[in-house]
Structure formats: structure tokens, C-alpha cells
């Protein structure tokens, strides 16, 4: 997929002069983000990469409309960032699943909340279970699943409403290395197939390079964007790419960009 990094504002995401300062309990303040300017094109896969405390989660939550900006503004598909949009889904590090519900019923949850057409959504849920290799577990309860399977359920649920925009905050960082790699290959395939705009927070360089069209490298105290690095690797992204000289060169480039700030 070729991606135009200069979107029209009406379909992409435009972050302009975004600052965030938190007030702390002792009356002080923390400058979590300073001066973030970024345009994201529809269909783009963009990672936010940096050490802990550089404002990645803060930025994602502001894009989701769950936190306000202290200064600046964020437009998502032509309207100011706001929570509860049907065209956006968010996935967190720890899957928020309902243990007493089956896999398919967890996947269908947003359909119930947003009161969408159940019959149509059910077909899509079944397709997504297929894509995430969960078909045979559809009627199992969440407590019967491994960590990697729970995150697959989360991913299927995030996609069931066919959102234009998928926000992911370190979705695989609690998983073991092997499971993480497998899920990254699956996520890349889903992205190649569905072409949804995806914003992916991580502190894992290899994962960012493997998945992204662009990597937004960040530093902490104050949280700032250091550099935005293009990832001109071919798509579809397949496991065979891992460890190739092009990939290693990009990983090193990203590591160098961030190294002086950690
Ligand atoms: N609710 C909050 N109140 C005060 N400070 C916060 C709050 N949330 C985050 N911070 C601070 O803002 C900075 C950025 O945090 P965060 O966005 O969670 O970074 P990251 O996701 O990159 O680890 C950190 O210094 C963190 O301690
Ligand atoms: Mg975070």
C-alpha cells in the first residue's frame, strides 16, 4: 500500500501544537507533552515509540478524546477529537474482557453498546474470529484462554464495528516474545487486508519497524517528538522480513534517534 503522508484534513488526523500538562496531587505540574504537530493519512499505520513516560499514552488518549489538550488541537476525520465515536476503536495493554461472556459475545459487545445491526455484525464477528484464528474457541469463556488469545479477542472486538481508526496502546507488551511476534504478523496481515488507519503505541523498536509506515520517535521530560522516520518496507509485511538487512538498518536508525534521550 502506498501512503500519502499529507492527508486532506477531512479524512485523516491532524494534531497541531498539542501540549498536555497534568496537575499533580501535591499542587505541582508535569509537562507530559509539548508541541506535537503531526498529520496522519487515512489508512496509514503509525507507531509512537519511546521510553516510558514520554507521553505516548497521553497522546493516544487525547486522540481518542478521553483527555483534553492543554493547548493546541486534534482533529479526527474533520471533527475535534471526542470520545464514544463509532468510527474509532481502542485497544489497551490489558484486555478488558468480560470473563462470564463467551468469546463471540465479548466480540459482539460494541455492537450491543452502539445498538448496531446484530445480524450483519454477527457475520462480521465470525469472519474476524476466523481471521484471528479463534473460530474453534467462539463458545469458550474468556477464563479458558491464554494471554495471547485474549488479545486476539480484544483485536477482533476492536474491529467488529469496522472502525476507520484503530488506536492501540502497547497491546502486546504483556505477552511473551513468541506470542508477540505471531500477533504482530497477524496484525500486519489484518492491516494489509483492511487498510484501517492504525495508531500503535510501543516501546519495542522491532515491532514498530515491522508494522509501521511511519514511526514517531519520542523522548521524555518533556514528552516531545524527536523525529518521524519513514519505513519504506514492502507490503504485505511478512514474517520473512524479520532480520533482513533493510529491517536491521531501520531498527538501528530508530535506535540512534532515541538513544541520546534515554
Ligand atoms: N493522570 C496523571 N497525572 C499526573 N501525571 C501524569 C498522569 N498521567 C501521566 N502522567 C505523567 O505524564 C508523563 C507521560 O505519561 P504517559 O503518557 O503515561 O507516558 P508513556 O505512555 O509514554 O509511558 C509521565 O511523566 C507521567 O508520569
Ligand atoms: Mg503508556
Image (spheres, rainbow, N blue to C red):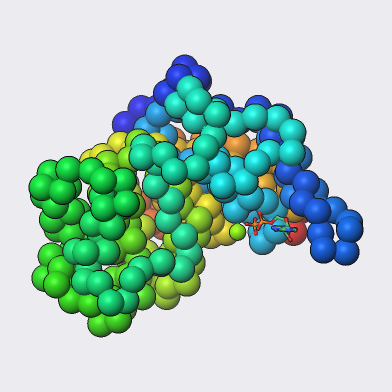
Residue lying at the far bottom of the rendered structure: 144
Taking 92 as reference, is 99 above or below it? Answer: below
Q: Residue at x 48, y 64 (%)?
A: 93
Please indicate, yes or no, whether residue 180 appears anywhere in the rendered image: yes
Looking at the figure, which quarter contains the N terminus?
top left
Closest to the observer: 60 or 102?
A: 102
Q: Furthest-top residue in view?
A: 8
Q: Residue 234, how many percent across, how many down? A: 34, 38
Residue found at x 46% / y 68%: 94
Residue appearing at x 40%, y 29% in the figure: 42
Q: Identify the residue shown where x is 30% and y is 36%.
A: 195
Number of marks in the image? 0
Q: Position of residue 110 (x, y in %)?
A: 31, 52
Q: Is residue 13 visible?
A: no
As drawn, is 190 to the left or to the right of 42?
left
Between 56 and 51, the one lying in front of the other is 56
Q: Which quadrant holds the C terminus?
A: bottom right
Specify whether 91 is left or right of 114: right
From the viewer's perspective, is 90 left or right of 137?
right
Q: Is residue 64 left or right of residue 33?
A: left
- Measured as percent of width and height from the top left, residue 133 is found at 18, 63
Which quarter of the rendered image does ligand 2 occupy?
Answer: bottom right
The quarter of the displayed image where residue 38 is located? top right
In this rendering, the answer to whether 160 lies above or below 229 is: below
Q: Is residue 34 above or below residue 96?
A: above
Residue 106 pos. (x, y %): 27, 64
Q: Quarter-wise, where is residue 161 in the image?
A: top left
Amino acid at each position: 500500500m502506498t501512503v500519502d503522508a499529507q492527508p486532506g484534513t477531512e479524512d485523516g488526523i491532524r494534531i497541531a501544537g498539542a501540549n498536555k500538562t497534568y496537575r499533580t496531587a501535591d499542587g505541582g505540574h508535569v509537562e507530559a507533552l509539548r508541541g506535537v504537530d503531526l498529520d496522519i493519512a487515512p489508512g496509514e499505520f503509525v507507531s509512537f515509540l519511546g521510553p516510558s513516560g514520554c507521553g505516548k499514552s497521553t497522546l493516544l488518549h487525547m486522540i481518542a478524546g478521553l483527555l483534553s489538550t492543554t493547548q493546541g488541537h486534534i482533529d479526527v476525520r474533520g471533527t475535534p477529537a471526542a470520545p464514544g465515536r463509532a468510527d474509532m476503536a481502542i485497544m489497551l495493554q490489558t484486555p478488558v474482557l468480560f470473563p462470564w461472556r463467551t468469546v463471540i459475545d465479548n466480540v459482539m459487545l460494541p455492537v450491543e453498546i452502539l445498538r448496531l445491526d446484530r445480524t450483519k455484525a454477527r457475520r462480521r464477528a465470525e469472519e474476524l474470529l476466523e481471521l484471528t484464528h479463534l473460530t474453534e474457541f467462539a463458545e469458550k469463556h474468556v477464563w479458558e484462554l491464554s494471554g495471547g488469545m485474549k488479545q486476539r479477542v480484544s483485536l477482533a472486538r476492536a474491529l467488529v464495528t469496522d472502525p476507520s481508526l484503530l488506536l492501540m496502546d502497547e497491546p502486546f507488551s504483556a505477552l511473551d516474545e513468541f506470542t508477540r511476534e505471531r500477533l504482530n504478523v497477524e496484525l500486519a496481515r489484518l492491516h494489509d487486508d483492511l487498510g484501517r488507519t492504525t495508531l500503535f503505541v510501543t516501546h519495542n523498536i522491532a515491532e514498530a519497524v515491522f508494522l509501521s509506515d511511519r514511526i514517531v520517535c519520542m523522548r521524555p521530560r518533556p514528552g516531545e517528538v524527536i523525529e518521524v522516520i519513514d519505513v519504506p518496507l514492502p507490503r504485505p509485511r511478512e514474517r520473512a522480513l524479520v532480520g533482513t538487512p533493510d529491517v536491521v538498518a531501520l531498527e538501528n536508525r530508530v535506535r540512534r534517534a532515541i538513544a541520546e534521550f534515554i
